[in-house]
Amino acid sequence: MVEELGVVRPDFPSVDSIRSVFQGFLRQEFGLVEDAIERRVADLDSLRALRTQTPLNGLADLDRFLLSRAAELTGRLQLAIAERSTARDRIQDARTANADAAELAALDLRFRVAELRFDRLSRGLDATADLLDSRRLPTAPYRQLLIQATGEVTSDVLNPTVAVGLVRD
């Protein structure tokens, strides 16, 4: 057994051939990284160009943008709530009908995607509501939706407008 260690087998690749393959692999990987960096730089350049072409003209534009963003997120969050609920109902129906494991797995995956979308949108609306609040703009409808959708009771309940809206709904 020890004698075999000193023997060079002709069917094994040489160190030079392994080195050249590894160098080729590294060149390819670095090329991919450089391409990704170039794409990122191009993206940043286009964003900079867009920013200079459509600047916000003061705080009024910022306020309009934030209110528009909050309204958009509200609509998308309401759709995500419905999608999550539908996915949950379909899983329950499939379990009741003794569906096979593949169908349950597919439904579970849909539910998880809906849950991730819901989480992302609720965090986005919460952050947008914080920005609106910092600009002293109305946030009650957005806070009410977040409390109803997430079930998380926050200090926003102390806001009379939010509390009245929750009780009314």
Image: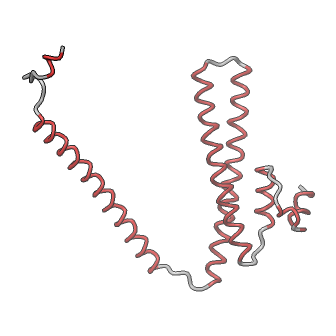
**Along the line of sight, which residue is nearer the eye, 129 or 93?**
129
Furthest toward the bottom, the residue is 58
Whether residue 81 sits left or right of residue 165 in the image: it is left
Name above or below for residue 130 compared with residue 8: below
Furthest toward the top, the residue is 1
Which residue is painted at 37% across and 62% down in the image? 40
Name above or below for residue 82 compared with residue 65: above
Colour pattern of the rendering: secondary structure
Which residue is painted at 70% across and 61% down in the image? 126
Whether residue 113 sits left or right of residue 22 in the image: it is right
Q: Position of residue 25 (x, y in %)?
A: 22, 43
Q: Position of residue 44 (x, y in %)?
A: 40, 68
Q: Position of residue 28 (x, y in %)?
A: 22, 48
**Along the line of sight, which residue is nearer the eye, 41 or 85?**
41
Q: Quadrant of residue 105?
A: top right
Q: Quadrant of residue 160?
A: bottom right
Whether residue 52 sits left or right of residue 115 in the image: it is left
Which residue is painted at 61% across and 80% down in the image? 61
In the rendered view of the protein, which quadrant contains the N terminus? Answer: top left
Q: Quadrant of residue 67?
A: bottom right
Which residue is painted at 83% across and 55% down in the image? 153
Name above or below for residue 60 compared with residue 101: below
In the rendered view of the protein, which quadrant contains the C terminus? Answer: bottom right
Name above or below for residue 91 compared with residue 98: below
Q: Position of residue 65 (x, y in %)?
A: 62, 73
Whether residue 157 sits left or right of residue 12 in the image: it is right
Furthest toward the left, the residue is 10
